[in-house]
Image (cartoon, rainbow, N blue to C red):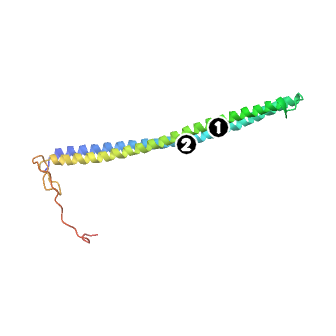
Amino acid sequence: MCDPMTAAVVGAQAFGQLYQGASQRGESRYQAAVSRNNAALSVEQARDARTRGEEESRLKWREIAATKGAQIAAMAAQGIDTSFGSAADVIGDTAVLGMEDINQIGQNQEREVRGFLIQAQNYREQGKAQKRAGDQAMISAVINAGSTVLGGAKSMPNISLPGFGAKGGSGGSAAPTFTPGPKVSAGAGPW
């Protein structure tokens, strides 16, 4: 017969280990869900950055067109032909400088979008790692609880472990030996 107090202590320790593992797993799953949400938000920020960049480029095109139109109108009002010479160069320079600005807007937009997409991928990977950590915590808790139960059973002097030839306790130096049960032939049993 085993000591009820020892059995209760062993059971409580095993339960505590399982509870701790389950708690860690739950926390890890929560953190993984937060990471998935953050990844989704980062993807949305990337879409927003792309939309803002496209709008900024569109506004810059309009600004360039307005500037060129104002230049042509001002020169034409003074009787200057804008199709050649310095007047054409001024209008051409306005277009070139505007294109440089638009290219810079596009590069800035793509850098911002890329940063958000990298951040989203980092969040996804972080979520995967958090989920794995939770699963590992639960596996560890199960192994530790099993070890606690077996260690507790071994320390109880009058307990017989099913399938093993020796009784628990620290009285002997011989390790328990496995005693196989009866052979079951195919087709035997209620199923």
Disc 2 to disc 1: CB gap under 8 Å: no
**Apparent side of residue 144 relative to residue 111 in the rendered image (left or right):** left
- Reading the image, the residue beneath label 2 is 43
Residue displayed at 26% across by 46% down: 145
| Residue assigned mark 1 | 106
Which kind of residue does numbered mark 2 sit on? Val
Residue that extends furthest to the front in the rendered view of this protein: 85
Left or right relative to 129: residue 142: left
Q: Where is residue 144 in the image (x, y as percent from the top left)?
A: 26, 45
Q: Nearer the viewer, residue 14 or 151?
A: 151
Q: How far apart are marks 2 and 1 (CA)?
A: 18 Å
The secondary element bearing badge 2 is classed as helix
Judge the density around disc 2: few (<14), some (14-19), many (≥20) Cα neighbours within 10 Å: many
Residue 11: x and y in percent read 23, 46
* Residue closest to the far left: 171
Say if 99 sits above or below 176 in the image.
Answer: above
Point 20% across, 48% down: residue: 150
Q: Nearer the viewer, residue 13 or 74?
A: 74
